[in-house]
Amino acid sequence: MKEDDIQILENIMVELNHFKFSRRSLSYQYLIEAIYLVVKDKTSIRNFNKNIYVPIAKKYNTKPENVQWSLSKLINLMYLNTPNKIIFDYFKFFMDEKPTLKFFIITIAQNVNDNLVIYR
């Protein structure tokens, strides 16, 4: 694995540590992969199904719909288990708003990119 890739993955983990996730779940691995793909190629957000869910599904030998469903459930559980103030402070939402799956992935990826630019 390249040094840049290791740095990206480390930054993803730092960002995800703000939130309460079940880190041993396969869904969490999907999330890391999804964020990584967006960090590596910003244009991938144009078609999440084709550019994010399909490659992850191929890697883990499942269907893209399963990846999307798993990620959605993971974000829902994170929202229920993470204090609202943490979500509000991170996303600048009103207290009762829940981030969508796409918004969550894109925002984390953007913050990872911002951190990588700062440290280069």
Image (cartoon, grey):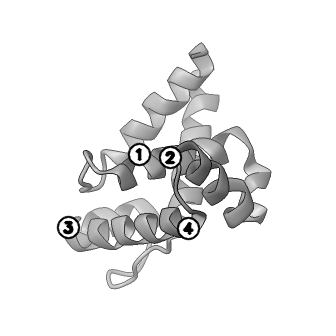
| Residue position for label 4 | 103
The residue at the point 31 percent across, 50 percent down is: 18
| Labelled pair 4, 2 in contact (Cβ < 8 Å) | no
| Residue position for label 1 | 29
- Mark 4 element type: helix
- What is the x, y in percent for residue 58? 61, 48
| Labelled pair 3, 4 in contact (Cβ < 8 Å) | no
Instruction: Give the CA separation, mark 1 to mark 3.
Output: 18 Å
Count the numbered circles shown.
4
Mark 1: few, some, or many residues within 10 Å (few <14, many ≥20)? some
Q: Is residue 85 visible?
A: yes
Mark 3: few, some, or many residues within 10 Å (few <14, many ≥20)? few
Instruction: Give the CA separation, mark 2 to mark 1.
Output: 10 Å
In primary-sequence order, the first of circles 4 and 2 is: 2
- What is the x, y in percent for residue 16? 37, 47
Task: Check the picture and name the quadrant holding the C terminus.
Answer: top right
- Mark 1 element type: helix
| Residue position for label 3 | 81
Which amino acid, by three-letter code, is at mark 3?
Asn
Relative to 32, is 86 above or below?
Answer: below
| Labelled pair 2, 1 in contact (Cβ < 8 Å) | yes
| Residue position for label 2 | 60
Task: Check the picture and name the quadrant holding the N terminus.
Answer: top right
Which amino acid, by three-letter code, is at mark 4?
Phe
- Mark 3 element type: helix
Q: Is residue 110 visible?
A: no
The residue at the point 74 percent across, 44 percent down is: 41
Relative to 82, is 15 above or below?
Answer: above
Instruction: Give the CA separation, mark 3 to mark 4.
Output: 18 Å
